[in-house]
């Protein structure tokens, strides 16, 4: 009896293993196809624009050489190399930079936030080996700590939604409809509060267009953080203190909200099976 | 009886809510203290170095103005602004750039990978509105898809470790010790394979020091991705195809491994309580 059960279990394990392998291969193929799609679209959309921009820059470079006869080509190339090196090292190149772009209090704080949230804009990055080593240790503890905080905030948000749903359910005598309404209300208000309204503030404070602010908001909250747009870096603007605090709170709560949304999409993408039993479990508990 | 139970449950809920609130406040205070620590250390370590670098750049700028008498200060400032703008837009400034820094096949592929893994180096970033909009949709599906793939790879790794542990356990007649040994063996071999050996390859291929390669490896696998170091960007190097494929595989498996490690640290950081019951559940299942 025991041997029979053990044999069946072993057979099930082997079958499960084979199924797991073939579904993993399918998953990896889908992943590669998705990457190929992205590669093709970005190549098409950006390739020509980049070529145009490069051409126009080369034209400007030649125009400059004509205007400034004292600069020859190698001198200009070496100047460009120096400037890019200094720019990457965060040196304040122009006479006026904001405190966000320097290793002062605000810049260091923003760098710490961008490290442990794994956004990593890279508008500032450590140059000394000591700071790099510390950065590694700081991230090693800070990233899990940040995840704990985000989970807690997400849990509180979830509790708030559940509380609303149960109160609506008592009023309407229809818990299912109340749950659905509270959920979609939370989704929509989060969308409004974290993605659709902040670009208005950013476009006012940073001089970006609404779409640029929206792109910045999404790239920040998804923790991709390319660093092509970073708040507080426009030297011709004065940033009040409440703005910086507001942005920090927005990052924190927005990331918690976005983590909830990504969890939702994830549970849709994962096929039901042995691998994702932990997901079903945790969603059943909630 | 029912009312009594409901009352007790409500009281428990209120107490649990109060406990949750105070522990959340404590957690947020710890979070702020940790950020303050990082701010202070980075400010101290980088502030002086940045000041030195800025001074030396300003000195160079003045020296340049002396050498090239045709350039006046405003002309140089506007030139610097143009160069930084073009650099941020990914235009090939210098005569020789690698394909990784351009919107061609390799660059677009690497950009797609860096987007859905949320590394976001930012050595390339989309400049046209169409590409930015597509980037948002691409990330919205791609990030969860990437998480699914990482979870699957992590699960396979875990299975491999469990398999080793059970075989060792049968041989030694001591399952506890075998489990512990297999676990620490997996941790150490992952450390070697994903963090300690790759810098050797990077220092050979990119001309970085070992420490720079290690810093790059950590910043990449933790998905922070400052973009101060990016592979394949040295124009004086020729990169073979196997190197780029190897790096892609390293990112994929390394991130899966690092996600396992961060999960481990997370389960140590989370205090046992109601909030983290889902964690305990999923770890009990594994
Ligand atoms: K990132
Ligand atoms: K980044």
Image (cartoon, coloured by chain):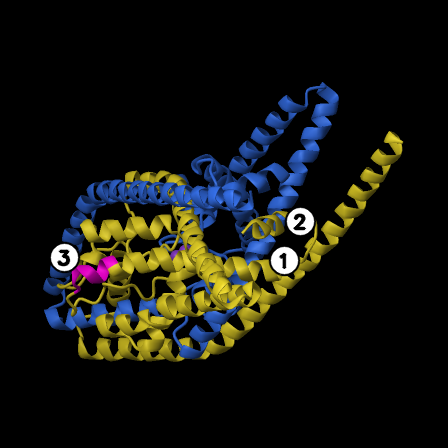
Chain colours: A blue, B yellow
Q: Chain of mark 1?
A: B
Q: Nearer the viewer, residue A49 or B7?
A: B7
- Magenta extent: B239-245
Residue B240: within the magenta? yes
Q: Is residue B211 above or below residue B145?
A: below
Residue A280: within the magenta? no
**Mark 2: few/some/many CA within 10 Å (<14, 14-19, 20+):** some
Q: Is residue A46 above or below residue A138?
A: above
Measured as percent of width and height from the top left, residue B264 is found at 54, 60
* Residue that label 2 marks: B275
* Residue that label 1 marks: B270
Q: Secondary structure at mark 1?
A: loop
Ligand 1's quadrant is: bottom left
Mark 1 and mark 3: span between their CA atoms?
A: 55 Å
* Residue that label 3 marks: A58
The quarter in which the C terminus of chain A is drawn is top right
């Amino acid at each position: 009896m025991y041997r029979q059960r053990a044999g069946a279990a072993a057979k099930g394990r082997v079958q499960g293993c084979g199924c797991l392998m073939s579904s993993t291969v399918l998953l990896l193929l889908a992943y590669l196809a998705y990457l190929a799609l992205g590669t093709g679209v970005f190549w098409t959309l950006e390739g020509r624009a980049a070529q145009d921009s490069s051409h126009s820059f080369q034209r400007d470079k030649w125009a400059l050489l004509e205007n400034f006869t004292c600069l020859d080509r190698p001198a200009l190339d070496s100047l460009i190399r120096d400037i890019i090196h200094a720019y990457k090292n965060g040196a304040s190149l122009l006479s006026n930079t904001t405190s966000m772009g320097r290793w002062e209090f605000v810049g260091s704080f923003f760098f710490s936030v961008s490290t442990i949230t794994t956004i990593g804009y890279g508008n500032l990055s450590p140059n000394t080996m000591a700071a790099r080593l510390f950065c590694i240790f700081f991230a090693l503890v800070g990233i899990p700590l940040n995840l704990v905080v985000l989970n807690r905030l997400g849990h509180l948000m979830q509790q708030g939604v559940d509380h609303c749903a149960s109160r609506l359910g008592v009023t309407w005598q229809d818990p299912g409809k109340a749950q659905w309404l509270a959920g979609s209300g939370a989704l929509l208000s989060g969308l409004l509060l974290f993605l659709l309204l902040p670009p208005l503030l950013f476009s006012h404070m940073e001089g970006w267009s609404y779409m640029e602010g929206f792109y910045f908001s999404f790239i920040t909250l998804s923790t991709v953080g390319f660093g092509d747009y970073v708040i507080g870096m426009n030297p011709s603007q004065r940033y009040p203190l409440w703005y910086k605090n507001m942005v920090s709170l927005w990052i924190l709560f927005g990331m918690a909200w976005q983590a909830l949304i990504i969890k939702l999409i994830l549970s849709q993408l994962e096929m039901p099976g042995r691998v994702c039993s932990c997901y079903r479990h945790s969603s059943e508990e909630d």
